[in-house]
Image (cartoon, rainbow, N blue to C red):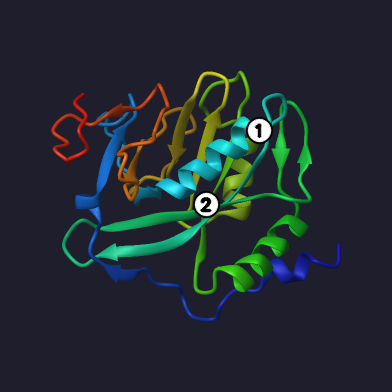
Amino acid sequence: MNTRSLIRLQPSETPQPTPAPIPADSARFWRSPFEGESLVGAVKVFITQPAYKSICAHAGGELDDETGGILVGQWYVDTGAAGEFIVIEEALPARHTRQGSVFLTFTQDTIVDFHNEIEERFPGKQIVGWYHTHPRMGIFFSHYDTWLHNHFFPEAWQVALVVEPHQDLGGLFIRQVNGSFDPARYFGFYELETDPQGSIVHWNNLQRAAGDSHAGGETQ
Ligand SMILES: [Zn+2]
């Protein structure tokens, strides 16, 4: 495969997170049922509302087959003590995928395509992870998902989002600080609010974190 060499191209310097204050004050946290059970992610994940909308539109537009794409944004380290975090700003649907009702896979061409698209449309941004759907299957990571994650998205700060579009479920798979990866227990995320209407998250398996005093006119 003649594109194989392209994917191996890496910057010669070790990438570093960009220092920035964590945007927790403009976000609300959506907690997964597993959080607090000794699950500690290597990064905290923020998703902008436009990115969340793109993901849901793509996921809801294909209810029978798995579909997916990549998550584009930036990798940061808090200028305080909150550690590393990523902000997911864009979701780009995959092309050149092999798609079927029980699997979706990226190919080398998919990844090359994405690098080109990011260079043109989102210069300076990074692939912070990927997303895919599990129609009627629930939120988990298959053996194949784990292989794909490690193969194409190997950085500690790259994450995977799984969406179940029939029951409106979603969860993030994030490597833990100790390097382990749990394919059964998913994380929630921080919704980065820009919409004056407030929250737009509608996944039934995530709960707005107690003690979140962020103004939005809603109560738990
Ligand atoms: Zn999967």
Q: Is residue 157 visible?
A: no
In-front residue for pair 214/9: 214
Q: In this figure, which residue is indicated by the disc labeled 2?
A: 129
Circle 2: residue type: Gly
> Can you tell which of label 2 and label 1 is closer to the viewer?
1
Q: Quadrant location of the C terminus? A: top left
Q: Is residue 157 left or right of residue 135?
A: left
Residue 171 lies in quadrant: top left
Q: Residue 164, percent across and down? A: 55, 26
Quadrant assignment for ligand 1:
top right
Q: Nearer the viewer, residue 136 or 54?
A: 54
Q: Residue furthest front?
A: 196
| Amino acid type at mark 1 | Gly
Q: Can I make out residue 34 in this image?
A: yes
Q: Tag 2's secondary structure? A: strand
> Residue 122 in the image: x percent, y percent?
55, 68
Residue 172 position, x and y percent, is 44, 38
The outermost residue toward the right is 1
Secondary structure at badge 1 equals loop
On the image, the x and y values in percent for residue 24 come to 22, 51
**Label 1 Cα neighbours within 10 Å, binned few <14 / some 14-19 / many ≥20:** few
Q: Which picture quadrant has residue 65?
A: top right
Which residue is rendered at x = 46% and y = 49% of the image?
50
Which residue is under mark 1?
61
**Residue 126 left/right relative to 4:** left
Quadrant, the N terminus: bottom right
Of callouts 2 and 1, the N-terminal one: 1
Circle 2 crowding by C-alpha within 10 Å: few under 14, some 14–19, many from 20 = many
Q: Residue at (60%, 67%) from the top-left corner?
A: 118
Identify which residue, 143 or 72, lies in the foreground: 72
